[in-house]
């Protein structure tokens, strides 16, 4: 039996009607009128842009807080809503979705730069179904078509309302829910398999982090303690945007890639900019360490990557590069320790975007063993980094393959018959 015949059997003649989102739902915005200080010690919970972008569903109480007055008119989110990011520097990443699959016992709000969709009464779409639907390749393509911009892409609500979504057996809610539930059951199995592998990888990463902290901890008086400022120089990069990135040119590191692409070290860049633009910007050299200095949460800030490439690399202005005589990989590993992060937390300014300046980095105390001991520590930690971080072998590779398998069957299970006239 082919996969397509399985979908046909699952539908068993059930009608699938494609309807514009604007006809079957209400669209509401995120928090308005908030300043940086409102996000410091708030009295209410809110769902962040990052949570929506990273998670297909919101299944627990969010931890981020914001100040909301009793007289304020702000939209509250609730079970069944689908949340979307409203903008992005990359057109294909705009409008990422996350369905709310749990109820909240208190008011929960939605951060700015995001919006929510609430289906009308009588529209039989369960949130466990919608969390998969809006992440399919087909829906992602349709959503990205509603965005426009140059350096930052924003969703047009009028175009977004015209997106067509499949309503299964609209005249028979019970049958519709049964079919949706079966699709969810199948996809949940795939995600459970991936979750098991991810849990195993997480356990290994905890082991890695334990050895990382242990390897870079020294008894009092065992090694010299210096500040990063005493041992080297921090230089801030200069601004460029993702629209500046081209297929070939001068290597560059955008700050967002520090979270999604780079690890302990790199000798090749993911992105490139033009020679003309690069001549106006700042570059790190082989042996420098690149620190990311901005992020949505404090825990994201400060991770370092040792640049070991033959070519100089242009650095984004939300990063610093560090020149010193220390082993660059030793410094990069150190930037992953609790000791390092406990120090920089004190210098990070928090808000919608948290950040740290050069002085904050310069104050960080780092143990400085001999060059030979630095090299020994690096060689030891490299073994664990290969095990937990390499995408070409071990668990990460298996997780990647499972995820591709899941995406294939997800898109297949949502390939409902679509009339030729049902297009935007």
Image (cartoon, rainbow, N blue to C red):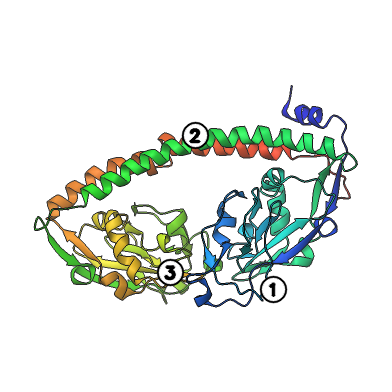
Q: How many marks?
A: 3
Mark 1 or mark 3: which comes first in sequence?
1
Quadrant location of the N terminus in the rendered image:
top right
Res. 364 image quadrant: bottom left
| Contact? badges 2 and 3 (CB < 8 Å) | no
Quarter occupied by the C terminus: bottom right
Q: Image height check: is 238 above or below 210?
A: below
Query: Label 1 neighbourhood size at 10 Å, few (<14), some (14-19), many (20+)?
Result: few
In front here: 132 or 107?
Answer: 107
Q: Is residue 251 among the parts visible in the rendering?
A: no
Residue that carries the numbered disc 1 in the rendered image: 73
**Mark 2 or mark 1: whose residue is earlier in sequence:** 1
Task: List the single residue furthest toward the right.
Answer: 171
Question: Regarding mark 1 in the picture, which secondary structure is present there?
Answer: loop
Q: Which residue, given by chain and number where applicable, does mark 3 sit on? A: 316
2 vs 1, front mark: 1
Front-lying residue, 346 or 140: 346
Query: Residue shown at 83%/49% (left/top)?
Result: 123
Front tag of 1 and 3: 1
Q: Residues within 10 Å of mark 3 (few under 14, many from 20)?
A: many
């Amino acid at each position: 039996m082919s996969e397509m015949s399985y979908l046909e059997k699952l539908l068993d003649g059930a009608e699938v009607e494609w309807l514009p989102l604007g006809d079957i739902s209400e669209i509401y915005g995120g928090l308005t009128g908030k300043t940086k200080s409102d996000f410091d010690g708030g009295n209410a919970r809110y769902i962040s842009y990052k949570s929506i972008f990273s998670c297909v569903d919101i299944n627990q109480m969010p931890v981020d807080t914001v100040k909301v007055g009793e007289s304020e008119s702000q939209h509250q989110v609730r079970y069944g809503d689908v949340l979307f990011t409203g903008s992005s520097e990359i057109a294909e990443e705009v409008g990422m979705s996350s369905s709310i699959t749990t109820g909240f016992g208190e008011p929960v709000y939605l951060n700015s730069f995001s919006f929510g969709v609430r289906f009308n009464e009588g529209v039989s779409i369960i949130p466990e179904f919608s969390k998969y639907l809006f992440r399919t390749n087909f829906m992602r393509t349709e959503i990205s078509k509603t965005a426009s911009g140059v350096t930052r892409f924003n969703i047009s609500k009028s175009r977004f309302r015209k997106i067509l979504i499949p309503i299964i057996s609209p005249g028979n809610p019970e049958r519709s829910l049964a079919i949706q539930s079966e699709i969810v059951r199948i996809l949940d199995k795939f995600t459970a398999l991936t979750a098991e592998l991810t849990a195993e990888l997480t356990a290994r990463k905890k082991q890695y982090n334990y050895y990382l902290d242990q390897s870079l901890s020294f008894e009092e008086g065992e090694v010299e303690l210096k500040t990063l400022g005493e041992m080297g120089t921090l230089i801030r990069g200069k601004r460029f945007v993702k629209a500046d990135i081209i297929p070939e040119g001068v290597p560059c590191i955008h700050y967002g890639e520090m979270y999604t692409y780079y690890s302990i070290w790199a000798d090749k860049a993911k992105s490139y900019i033009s020679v003309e633009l690069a001549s106006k910007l700042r570059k790190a050299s082989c042996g420098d360490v690149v620190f990311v200095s901005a992020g949505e949460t404090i825990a994201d800030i400060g991770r370092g990557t040792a640049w070991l490439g033959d070519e100089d690399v242009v650095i984004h202005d939300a990063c610093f590069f560090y020149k010193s005589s220390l082993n660059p990989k030793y410094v990069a590993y150190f930037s992953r320790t609790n000791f390092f992060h406990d120090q920089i937390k004190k210098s990070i300014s928090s808000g919608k975007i948290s950040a740290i300046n050069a002085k904050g980095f310069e104050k960080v105390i780092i143990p400085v063993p001999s060059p030979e001991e630095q090299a020994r520590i690096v060689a030891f930690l490299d073994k664990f980094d290969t095990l937990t971080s390499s995408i070409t072998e071990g668990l990460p590779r298996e997780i990647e393959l499972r995820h591709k398998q899941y995406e294939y069957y997800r898109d297949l299970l949502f390939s409902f018959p679509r009339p030729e006239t049902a297009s935007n």
